[in-house]
């Protein structure tokens, strides 16, 4: 049954009438093992079908913003006053200065934009996770299967091939996450990446790694030279042994993927820097300025808004640290679930954007639209549905294209 919400660019195809358990079992076999988390249904059995016109615009917006943010990183590179503004921990500065910048478009080979796409089809960038995005299994494995079952086309089918091409370039010998083997989502994510790469890569737990005079080793004392890690680089400033890991990279003993400069792309301070340069008429040409004014929200390092804005840590993850302020500038809502990283890192202040609302069998939810950029190419939609703040408690919903 399709129903449109007063001409939304999304149609919701509700499939909750289908028997859930065999579908969960099939997804599990494909490698998506956390469709149900305990008693919670993480996967919503529905498809959000986006209009083709909106998808084409989203894909084009992603390509343009990718190059705009890439240009901004090159401008910021080796400028320590700007590192500070972006909230980059000083322990990483030398690593960022010493390591060569990758070619244009490849600062991160595995990234995900998060967009607010409204019911009217207005597209605004909320943030870019260029360092350690998750949702890969949901987007590359679950979404195409769910869409195919529903007879809806999915643009996500190129993700695996693009990932394999990226990892042929990077050739990691090791993939790591924290709590490998027990954290379902992170373990499943690196296992899927390894499988899709077609390479012989060992999966390890970050907590088993140790650094011996700048050489990184795993629990079996195997030397690691090239590592993909679902480990946020800003934590090197906080974790015991973080400076030793940074030293290993500085010395050239360890190559990390995504590369070190992905943290410059990751910082929400970079979006504030882009907006600031746009307002000052610096760096960007007419075409880039048009894309910035269309798709980037006014974002600042200080709370300059009188109302209707969001504050978030430059390195907030999973909704942690997000606070929403209403028209009067009063706090309306704050995330209680995620870790509030604003105690460690500075904040940015961003104008609020409207998310599409979708009616599910459970409730009316807000839809956040993710777009993966793998090997420099926008290639995969990730739908998450939840409250006004899309945090850890949000649900996965497949997004297809009409």
Image (tube, grey):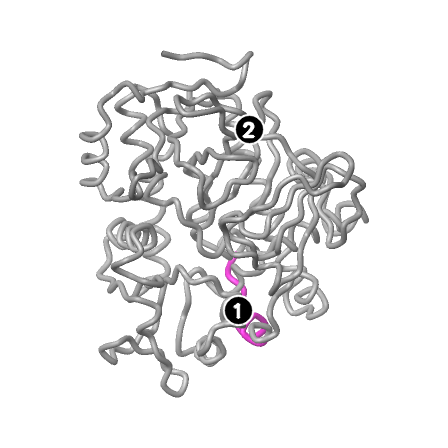
Q: In the picture, which quadrant includes the C terminus? A: top left
Q: In the picture, which quadrant includes the N terminus? A: top left
Q: How crowded is mark 2: few (under 14 residues within 10 Å), some or many (20 or more)?
A: some
Indicate which disc residue 286 carries. none
Q: Can residue 288 be seen in this view?
A: no
Which element type, helix, strand or loop, lies under badge 2? helix
Q: Is residue 382 visible?
A: yes
For the image, the number of numbered tags is 2
Gap in Å between the C-alphas at discs 1 and 2? 33 Å
Q: Would residue 130 appear left or right of 326 to someone viewing this image?
A: left
Check residue 101 for magenta coloring.
yes
Residue picked out by circle 2: 57
Q: Is residue 206 above or below residue 280?
A: below
Residue that protrudes farthest toward the bottom in the picture: 213
Q: Residues within 10 Å of mark 1 (few under 14, many from 20)?
A: few
What residue do we see at 67% from left, 37% from top?
A: 352
Q: Would residue 253 appear left or right of 327 to someone viewing this image?
A: left
What residue do we see at 33% from left, 40% from top?
A: 140
Q: In this view, does 172 lie above or below 298?
A: below
The answer to which of 140 and 320 lies nearer the viewer is 320
Q: Would residue 238 appear left or right of 290 to someone viewing this image?
A: left
| Percent of width and height locating residue 396 | 39, 36
Residue picked out by circle 1: 100
The span shown in magenta is 94-103
| Percent of width and height locating residue 131 | 48, 57
| Percent of width and height locating residue 227 | 35, 66
| Percent of width and height locating residue 60 | 54, 34
């Amino acid at each position: 049954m399709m129903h449109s919400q007063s001409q939304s660019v999304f149609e919701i195809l509700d499939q909750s009438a289908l028997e859930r358990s065999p579908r969960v079992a099939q997804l599990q076999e494909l490698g998506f093992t956390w469709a149900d988390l305990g008693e919670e249904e993480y996967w919503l059995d529905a498809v959000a079908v986006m209009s083709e016109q909106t998808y084409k615009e989203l894909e084009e917006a992603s390509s343009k913003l990718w190059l705009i943010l890439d240009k901004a990183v090159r401008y910021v590179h080796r400028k320590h006053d700007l590192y500070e503004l972006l909230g980059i921990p000083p322990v990483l500065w030398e690593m960022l200065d010493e390591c060569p910048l990758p070619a244009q478009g490849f600062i991160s080979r595995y990234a995900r934009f998060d967009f607010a796409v409204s019911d009217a089809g207005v597209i605004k960038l909320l943030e870019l996770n260029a360092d350690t995005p998750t949702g890969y299994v949901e987007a590359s494995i679950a979404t195409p299967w769910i869409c195919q079952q529903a007879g809806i086309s999915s643009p996500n089918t190129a993700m695996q091939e693009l990932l394999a091409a990226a990892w042929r370039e990077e050739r990691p010998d090791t993939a790591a996450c924290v709590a490998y083997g027990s954290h379902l989502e992170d373990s499943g994510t690196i296992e899927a990446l390894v499988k899709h790469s077609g390479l012989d890569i060992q999966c390890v737990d970050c907590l088993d790694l140790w650094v011996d005079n700048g050489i990184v080793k795993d629990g079996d004392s195997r030397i690691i030279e090239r590592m993909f890690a679902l480990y946020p680089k800003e934590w090197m400033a906080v974790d015991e042994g973080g400076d030793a890991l940074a030293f290993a990279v500085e010395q050239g003993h360890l190559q990390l993927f995504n590369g070190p400069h992905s943290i410059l792309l990751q910082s929400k301070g970079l979006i504030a820097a882009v907006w600031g340069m746009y307002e000052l008429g610096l760096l960007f040409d007419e075409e880039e300025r048009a894309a910035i004014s269309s798709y980037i929200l006014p974002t600042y390092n200080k709370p300059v808004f009188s109302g209707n804005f969001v504050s978030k840590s430059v390195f907030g993850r999973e909704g942690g640290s997000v606070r929403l302020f209403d028209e009067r500038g009063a706090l309306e809502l704050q995330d209680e679930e995620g870790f509030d990283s604003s105690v460690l890192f500075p904040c940015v202040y961003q104008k609020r954007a409207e998310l599409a609302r979708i009616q599910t069998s459970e409730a009316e939810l807000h839809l956040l639209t993710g777009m993966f950029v793998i090997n420099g190419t926008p290639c995969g939609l990730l739908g998450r549905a939840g409250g006004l703040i899309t945090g850890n408690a949000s649900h996965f919903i497949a997004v297809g294209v009409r």
